[in-house]
Image (cartoon, rainbow, N blue to C red):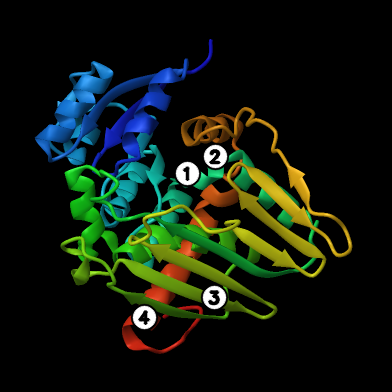
Amino acid sequence: MAKSYRVGVACMSHDHVWGEIAIWQSLPNVQLVGAGDDEPHLLERFTQQTGITNTYYSWQELLENEELDVLQVAGGNSEGADIVEAAAARGIHVISEKPMAATLAQANRMYNAALQAGTKLLINWPTAWSPAWQELAKRALGGEIGTIHNTRYRSAHNGPIAIGCEKSFIRDLITPEINGAGAFMDYCCYGADLAALLLGLPHSVTGMRGYFGTEPGYAASDDNGMIIAKYPHAFGLCEASWTQPVGYAGNNPVVYGSEGALSILKSNVYLQKPGQPTEEITPAELVYPYRNGPEYLLHCIETGEEIEGYCSPQVSRDAQEILEAGLRSANSGLTQVLPLE
């Protein structure tokens, strides 16, 4: 008989959590058993969505009262390190929403805790479950455009309030002690993850951030940011904005190499080669176990395979170092040399 996994949810202020909870409940070998959070309205929403009444007023109470195999973590960026350490000590595998943490020190704690305990840690990047992003990574890492010289991704919208984020999520996003920064951390992280996957850790990082908009509260952090990661033969550009009221003006992301370029426009991948017409590629539909984070995490638990790709704890930890270096640079005006001390 196939194993049934007992899953709990620790913290729910990250708006991505509600879609993940629905995925967990759709899996045949999963029993969603309860949730822990110190905000009553989030516990109430959990019960309304799931029909599950086992709720606790902290993630600590959840761990103390429920036997769990997997923990879904979806709080503020700064909460993940404590939760992962506690879960790992109990042999509980973790899936945590992006980015990995608010600081590099926290990301290192998460990485080391899972490594030492032998538990799985998956950082859940929504881009990882895009057919186009999977196709782009496969082709770029497979050498289809030669040596990569440039990665570029802009992640943007018109601000958490404007797009209707839940009040607890807005609070987390605009509080630097929780989020690490503002848009800089929330959205430069995607470009950092792409660069870390395709290029690894850079030699140096230059970052900039600023407050350009009108939504209240962001001036304490930032609503626009940019990182340039410098590699021996490449640049990784990461852009973030909470002041963009329109869609993207052009293909996004873009990866340039010595023998061509790969990019994404809407749901298709575009391959450019010298002297050849641009090829428009419709990616294949996602297949098991690469359709979502919960499914992939359970696959890796059952097979013993390492978590790879965008959601790898190593790649996500390297992305955090790029973010930390960019933030230090933005605050000091000085380019940061890696590895950071």
- Taking the image as shown, residue 308 lies to the left or right of residue 31, namely right
Helix, strand or loop at label 1? It is: helix
Residue type of the residue flagged with mark 2: Trp
Q: Are marks 2 and 1 in contact (CB under 8 Å)?
A: yes
Q: Going by the picture, which residue comes out furthest to the right?
A: 275
Tell me: residue 253, above or below residue 339. above
Q: Are marks 4 and 3 in contact (CB under 8 Å)?
A: no
Return the disc, 1 or 4, that comes first in the chain's sequence: 1
Q: Which residue is mark 3?
A: 229
Give the distance between the C-alpha atoms of the residues marked 3 and 2, in whole angstroms.
25 Å
Q: Tell me if mark 3 has few (under 14), some (14-19) or many (20+) residues whose alpha carbon lies within 10 angstroms of its own.
A: many
- Taking the image as shown, residue 83 lies to the left or right of residue 91, namely left
Residue type of the residue flagged with mark 1: Pro
Residue at (38% x, 45% y) in the render = 96
Return the disc, 4 or 3, that comes first in the chain's sequence: 3
Give the distance between the C-alpha atoms of the residues marked 3 and 1, in whole angstroms.
22 Å
Q: Which residue is mark 4?
A: 330
Tell me: residue 256, above or below residue 32. below
Q: Which residue is mark 2?
A: 129
Return the disc, 3 or 1, that comes first in the chain's sequence: 1
Q: Which residue is mark 1?
A: 126
Helix, strand or loop at label 3? It is: strand
Return the disc, 4 or 2, that comes first in the chain's sequence: 2
| 1 vs 231, nearest the viewer | 231
Residue at (39% x, 78% y) in the render = 208
Residue type of the residue flagged with mark 3: Ala
Res. 101 image quadrant: bottom left
